[in-house]
């Protein structure tokens, strides 16, 4: 399994699995898998699966995404369509840099309507913009973008503010 994927055998499935770099087989023996080593192993396994599908179906192409969770892997599968695989990376920084430029529409479950709501209500069009602060708690002045979400910051009337002033 590992040799075919590493050598690029089986229909070229190993050619584009380089995004999940990590330690080699020797580094993985006898030790717990690190995120990078796990990524490399996942890349090899996915490459082998893609090669077997291509061989068994006489040429059917497949795309695969590799990530730390199902949602990220599903999004990553669209990156190298129609016949490739992509790894988001395993560190927090790698995942955030992968997600930042993506349109919110690429997130499963976000359709035309939700995309429009996010754009109009919050001025958000990319996943990276979702992480940026839109409301300032310390300043009385708000930007037009932040003003659109100020109504969500208000506390309901039935909640008492018990913080010391």
Image (cartoon, rainbow, N blue to C red):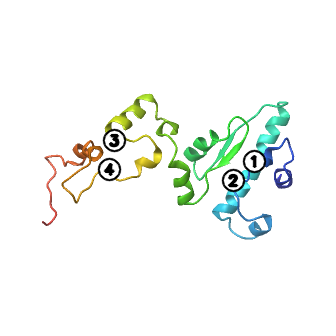
Which one is earlier in the sequence, the residue at label 1 or at label 4?
1
Q: Which mark is residue 16?
A: 1
Mark 2, secondary structure of its residue: loop
Residue with the mark numbered 2: 19
User: Spatial distance from mark 4 to mark 3, Cα to Cα?
Assistant: 8 Å
Q: Residue 102: x and y, percent? A: 52, 43
Asked if marks 2 and 1 touch (Cβ < 8 Å), the reply is: yes
Residue with the mark numbered 4: 134
Which one is earlier in the sequence, the residue at label 1 or at label 3?
1
Instruction: Name the residue: 61% across, 44% down.
Output: 76
Asked if marks 4 and 3 touch (Cβ < 8 Å), the reply is: yes
User: Spatial distance from mark 2 to mark 4, Cα to Cα?
Assistant: 33 Å
User: Spatial distance from mark 2 to mark 3, Cα to Cα?
Assistant: 33 Å
Residue with the mark numbered 3: 122
Q: Residues within 10 Å of mark 4 (few under 14, many from 20)?
A: many
Mark 3, secondary structure of its residue: helix
Q: Residues within 10 Å of mark 3 (few under 14, many from 20)?
A: some
Which one is earlier in the sequence, the residue at label 2 or at label 3?
2
Instruction: Name the residue: 48% across, 35% down.
Output: 109
Asked if marks 1 and 4 touch (Cβ < 8 Å), the reply is: no
User: Spatial distance from mark 1 to mark 3, Cα to Cα?
Assistant: 37 Å
Q: Residue 59: x and y, percent? A: 82, 31
Which one is earlier in the sequence, the residue at label 4 or at label 3?
3
């Amino acid at each position: 399994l590992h040799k075919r994927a590493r050598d690029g055998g089986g229909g070229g499935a190993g050619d584009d699995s380089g995004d999940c770099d990590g330690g080699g087989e020797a580094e993985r023996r006898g030790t717990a898998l690190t995120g990078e080593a796990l990524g490399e192993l996942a890349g090899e396994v996915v490459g082998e699966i893609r090669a077997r599908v291509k061989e068994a179906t006489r040429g059917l192409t497949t795309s695969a995404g590799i990530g730390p969770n199902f949602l990220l892997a599903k999004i990553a599968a669209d990156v190298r369509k129609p016949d490739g695989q992509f790894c988001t990376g395993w560190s927090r920084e790698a995942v955030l840099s992968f997600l930042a430029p993506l349109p919110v529409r690429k997130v499963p479950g976000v359709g035309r309507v939700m995309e429009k709501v996010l754009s109009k209500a919050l001025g958000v069009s990319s996943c990276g913009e979702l992480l940026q602060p839109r409301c300032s708690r310390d300043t009385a002045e708000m930007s037009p973008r932040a003003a659109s979400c100020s109504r969500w910051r208000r506390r309901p009337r039935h909640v008492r503010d018990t913080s010391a002033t």
